[in-house]
Image (tube, rainbow, N blue to C red):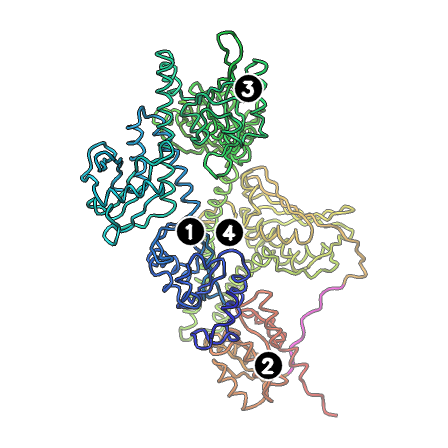
């Protein structure tokens, strides 16, 4: 085929010249042509067909003329209704298809015939993964399938013949079996009568056929008998001959001579209504059925002879012999010549003609398997030999392979009237199926045991007396007992924790209703541990129960935690709404007041103060939320330096004193005389103590007492905040540091928080490699929080206070504010103008770029989330203009994550302010910038 591929003029084909063929096609063809396995490649939308030498016999010589390089459908049009959907599945869905012994009626060598194939269709893909062809590997299994069918037919026929009592019954059994196997419409028996110059044709039922054969038809039959070879008439109407015409309503005939005494005396006639091509396999099957029939007839004749010779006793023995479910044979003499063999024995050896033959001639394949030697030993010694499950290899079909059987048998010596050993009785059974079934049962048992032992779920079986009969390893682990303490014991002895629970009712319902049930139970083990078990109970075949069980305590705990977290989330959202509405109410009222005409200066200052305080409160809430988000995600970076905890306490007390004084609490602070040095972030540690002091102030009734003590050891600095407030129970103490967890909140406790402060405290302390703990004697008995931090060596001389704020500049700056929020931009401009700066306001990026052409700008205050282009891009484009090249860029934004700060720095922003803007901080920064830009004094 490689030569045909090279010699073909592909340039005129739809594939084009070979050098232009795709790599995937060339690769597939190389695999195909180099393989000794029958392979074809179907390529492209029209499935152009290529194949190797091993594949050519599947096509046949007639198709091979045009098949190579032609469309596959043209070669296989007769089977395309069967294989076409498979081809579509491969080409359109990219899914491989495999077939096992698929029967197909194909045109080959001038005729349509049945063939069987085992094949696979696989997609061929190009470099993009698209299916561009398919790879076909096929093996014709027609011969093997036919052999298997013949063997099955022979076994069935042998079984049928084994049960017949006479030659006519054997003929009918053979005819019925052959008719079913060949799908024949007529099975007849033709026997010439030379004296009358005619032949009578009878069907298998024994009735006279519709025609007697005379003249040419009789001559045709005689010629067939004389030749001794099967006569095939495929088409009676298309030249089948005189014999075919003599049998009406049949389109095809097969005539098989029956040989008797060296010559053919009769024939078996097989007919089909329509024309049919008789295959060699069908002829061979029919011929083999005749051989079996003749063997059965020979056996029947032999039995008849024995009956005549031995009388009634032999007849009784023969019936027992033939009807015995086991195989029986009798040999005589030291050569072990077969004298008798029943049907079971003949079936076991493949229905061979063995009578009057020595066993070494009748069954030569037994040589080397030890049977001949065993027979010799039994015959010589007179000692019987018994075997159980002994393997034997027999050639049960002529020319077929050796088949292994498992046999139980006995070699029993037979003695004559004088007591001398004259032969051997062979009796036994074919136990192949039992041994295979037993082996399968053992394998199934081992698989089941392996599955049960490796399961991560307990399994047990109890009988109808509630006694445990089976349990796996996981079941023993869950029961916390050894196998000897479980098997054979009453169920309630093994699992006492389930006694008296709904499990008893569950088991009884399953026993009564024979229906499966599943339920979860909470039980207590003997050691007092509470666990949850999921039990699935099933009725067993013996009237007991089989049940699976597993410990689902962790799942139940996780479900409860999810429910608790969901509840805390709902409470948190409600609390957040409450906390945000509280400052919004005075801000809204203040805004309404500012709209009134004639408002005086003192009231204006008071209103401004209210707005400022409430905005700071809202900013604090948002900062807490952002802090806990950053800390829990590991995004906080501590500014580590050597700190004195005494200064941290001072700063925290300063921040919380207004709340403490407002609630008229008495605050007692105890500081050590020696330095309390730690490594940490001053801002974050102040935040920790501030949260604890704020909590103490909030949850202590007015007029209470709060204490803050600092203790120092060689390795640890401890800060303890205690109060005589509402306290907490043991359940709350175990959860107080969880996110969104807070004590019961009454409607009049206006100082309650969002339930994130203590979670933030715990996270920040742990970032400093410290610990925080809580203690309370119960509700109403106050609380005590202790923060423990690793102590660091501290030198008083190295401590330097943080630098103060920069003084405001003596002159203003040229500032441009760009924010699409008109109100926010205008208010920021008013604030900056009130401090002496010249401010320009724009609300879109392109307006800001146009305004920059009017003059240079010292400082840009840019919102990040602008329309049309974001603040990052606007900053870069402003810096590229001459009037903005030396300006300072300050981001004014609601995005405050660390990543947002890094993004603004990368875009060229020098500073990053969060909304709402810290007005004082921004004023100090602008004052510093103004001082840096102040012109030098005149000389």
Q: Secondary structure at mark 4?
A: loop
In the displayed structure, 198 sits above or below 585; it is above
Looking at the image, which is closer to me, 929 or 199?
Answer: 199
Q: Residues within 10 Å of mark 4 (few under 14, many from 20)?
A: some
Residue topped by disc 3? 334
The answer to whether residue 808 is left or right of residue 461 is: right
Task: Find residue 859 and name its label.
Answer: 2
- Segment tinted magenta in the rendering: 800-810
Residues at badges 4 and 1 in contact (C-beta under 8 Å)?
no
Residue topped by disc 4? 752
Residue topped by disc 1? 117
Q: Identify the residue at image location x=42%, y=33%.
A: 519
Picture coordinates of residue 413 (x, y %)?
52, 14
Q: Secondary structure at mark 2?
A: strand
The answer to whether residue 114 is left or right of residue 420 is: left
| Eye-nearest disc, 4 or 1 | 1
| Eye-nearest disc, 2 or 3 | 3
Cα–Cα span, label 2 and label 1: 86 Å
Residues at badges 2 and 3 in contact (C-beta under 8 Å)?
no
Along the polypeptide, which appears first: circle 2 or circle 1? 1
The answer to whether residue 895 is left or right of residue 148 is: right
Along the polypeptide, which appears first: circle 1 or circle 3? 1
Whether residue 808 is in magenta: the answer is yes
Q: Secondary structure at mark 1?
A: strand
Picture coordinates of residue 90 (x, y %)?
42, 59
Looking at the image, which is closer to me, 76 or 775?
Answer: 76
Cα–Cα span, label 4 and label 1: 82 Å
Cα–Cα span, label 1 and label 3: 50 Å
Task: Find residue 260 and name its label.
Answer: none
């Amino acid at each position: 085929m490689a030569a045909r591929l090279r010699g073909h003029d592909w340039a005129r084909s739809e594939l084009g010249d070979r050098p232009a063929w795709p790599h995937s096609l060339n690769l597939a063809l190389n695999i195909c042509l180099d393989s000794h396995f029958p392979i074809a490649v179907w390529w492209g939308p029209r499935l152009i067909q290529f194949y190797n030498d091993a594949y050519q016999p599947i096509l046949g010589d007639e198709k091979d003329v045009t098949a190579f390089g032609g469309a596959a459908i043209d070669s296989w049009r007769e089977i395309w209704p069967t294989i076409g959907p498979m081809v579509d599945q491969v080409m359109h869905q990219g899914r491989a298809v495999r077939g096992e012994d698929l029967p197909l009626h194909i045109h080959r060598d001038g005729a349509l015939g049945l063939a069987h194939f085992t094949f696979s269709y696989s997609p061929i893909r190009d470099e993009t993964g698209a299916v561009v062809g398919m790879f076909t590997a096929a093996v014709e299994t027609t011969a093997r399938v036919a052999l298997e069918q013949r063997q099955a037919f022979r076994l069935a026929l042998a079984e049928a013949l084994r049960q017949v009592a006479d030659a006519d019954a054997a003929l009918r059994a053979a005819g019925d079996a052959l008719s079913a196997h060949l799908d024949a419409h007529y099975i007849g028996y033709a026997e010439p009568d030379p004296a009358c110059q005619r032949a009578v044709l009878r069907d298998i039922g024994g009735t006279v056929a519709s025609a007697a054969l005379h003249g040419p038809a009789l001559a045709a039959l005689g010629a067939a008998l004389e030749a001794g070879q099967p006569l095939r008439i495929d088409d009676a109407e298309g030249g089948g001959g005189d014999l075919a015409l003599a049998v009406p309503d049949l389109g095809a005939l097969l005539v098989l001579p029956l040989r008797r005494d060296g010559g053919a005396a009769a024939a078996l006639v097989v007919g089909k209504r329509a024309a049919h091509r008789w295959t060699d396999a069908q002829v061979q099957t029919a011929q083999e059925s005749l051989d079996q029939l003749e063997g059965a007839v020979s056996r029947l004749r032999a039995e008849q002879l024995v009956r005549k010779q031995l009388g009634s006793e032999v007849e009784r023995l023969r019936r027992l012999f033939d009807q015995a479910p086991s195989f029986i044979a009798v040999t005589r003499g030291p050569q072990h010549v077969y004298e008798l063999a029943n049907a079971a024995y003949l079936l076991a050896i493949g229905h061979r003609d063995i009578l009057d033959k020595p066993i070494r001639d009748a069954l030569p394949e037994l040589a080397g398997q030890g049977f001949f030697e065993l027979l010799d030993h039994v015959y010589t010694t007179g000692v019987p030999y018994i075997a159980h499950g002994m393997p034997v290899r027999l050639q049960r079909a002529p020319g077929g392979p050796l088949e292994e059987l498992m046999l139980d048998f006995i070699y029993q010596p037979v003695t004559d009237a004088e007591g001398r050993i004259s032969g051997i009785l062979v009796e036994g059974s074919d136990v192949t199926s039992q041994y295979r079934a037993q082996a399968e049962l053992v394998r199934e048992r081992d698989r089941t045991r392996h599955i049960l032992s490796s399961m991560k779920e307990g399994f047990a079986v109890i009988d109808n007396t509630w006694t445990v009969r089976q349990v796996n390893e996981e079941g023993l682990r869950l029961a916390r007992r050894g196998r000897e303490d479980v098997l054979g014991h009453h169920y309630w002895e093994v699992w006492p924790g389930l006694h008296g629970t709904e499990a008893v009712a569950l088991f009884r319902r399953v026993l009564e209703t024979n229906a499966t049930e599943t339920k979860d139970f909470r039980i207590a083990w003997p050691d007092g541990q509470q666990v949850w078990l999921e039990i699935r109970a099933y009725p067993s075949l013996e009237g007991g129960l089989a049940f699976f069980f597993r410990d689902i305590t962790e799942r139940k705990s996780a479900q409860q935690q999810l429910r608790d977290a969901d509840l805390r989330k709902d409470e948190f959202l409600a609390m957040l709404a409450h906390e945000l509405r509280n400052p919004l109410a005075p801000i809204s009222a203040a805004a309404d007041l500012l709209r009134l005409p004639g408002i005086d200066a003192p009231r204006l200052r008071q209103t401004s103060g209210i707005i400022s305080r409430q905005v700071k409160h809202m900013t604090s809430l948002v900062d807490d939320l952002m802090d806990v988000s950053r800390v829990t995600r590991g995004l906080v970076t501590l500014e580590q330096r050597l700190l004195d905890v005494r200064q941290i306490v001072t700063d925290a007390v300063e921040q919380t004193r207004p709340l403490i004084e407002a609630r008229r609490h008495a605050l007692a602070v105890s500081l050590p005389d020696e330095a309390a040095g730690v490594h940490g972030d001053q801002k974050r540690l102040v935040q920790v103590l501030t949260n604890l002091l704020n909590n103490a102030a909030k949850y202590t009734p007015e007029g209470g007492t709060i204490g803050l003590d600092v203790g120092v050891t060689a390795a640890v600095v401890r800060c303890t905040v205690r109060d005589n407030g509402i306290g907490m129970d043991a359940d709350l103490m175990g959860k107080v540091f969880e996110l969104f967890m807070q004590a019961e909140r009454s409607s009049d406790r206006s100082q309650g928080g969002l339930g994130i402060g203590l979670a933030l405290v715990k996270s920040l302390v742990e970032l400093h490699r410290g610990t925080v703990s809580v203690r309370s004697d119960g509700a109403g008995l106050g609380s005590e929080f202790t923060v423990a931090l690793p102590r660091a060596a501290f030198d008083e001389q190295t401590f330097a206070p943080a630098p103060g704020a920069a003084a405001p500049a003596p002159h203003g700056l040229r500032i441009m504010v760009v924010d699409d929020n008109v109100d926010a931009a205008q208010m920021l401009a008013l604030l900056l103008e009130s401090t002496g700066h010249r401010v320009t306001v724009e609300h879109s990026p392109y307006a800001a770029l146009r305004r920059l052409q009017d003059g240079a700008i010292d400082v840009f205050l840019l919102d990040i989330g602008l329309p049309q282009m974001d603040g990052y891009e606007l900053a870069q484009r402003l810096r590229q203009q001459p009037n903005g090249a030396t300006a300072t860029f300050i981001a004014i934004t609601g995005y405050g994550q660390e990543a947002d700060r890094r993004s603004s720095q990368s875009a060229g922003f020098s500073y990053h302010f969060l909304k709402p803007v810290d007005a004082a901080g921004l004023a100090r920064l602008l004052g510093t910038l103004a001082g840096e830009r102040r012109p030098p004094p005149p000389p």
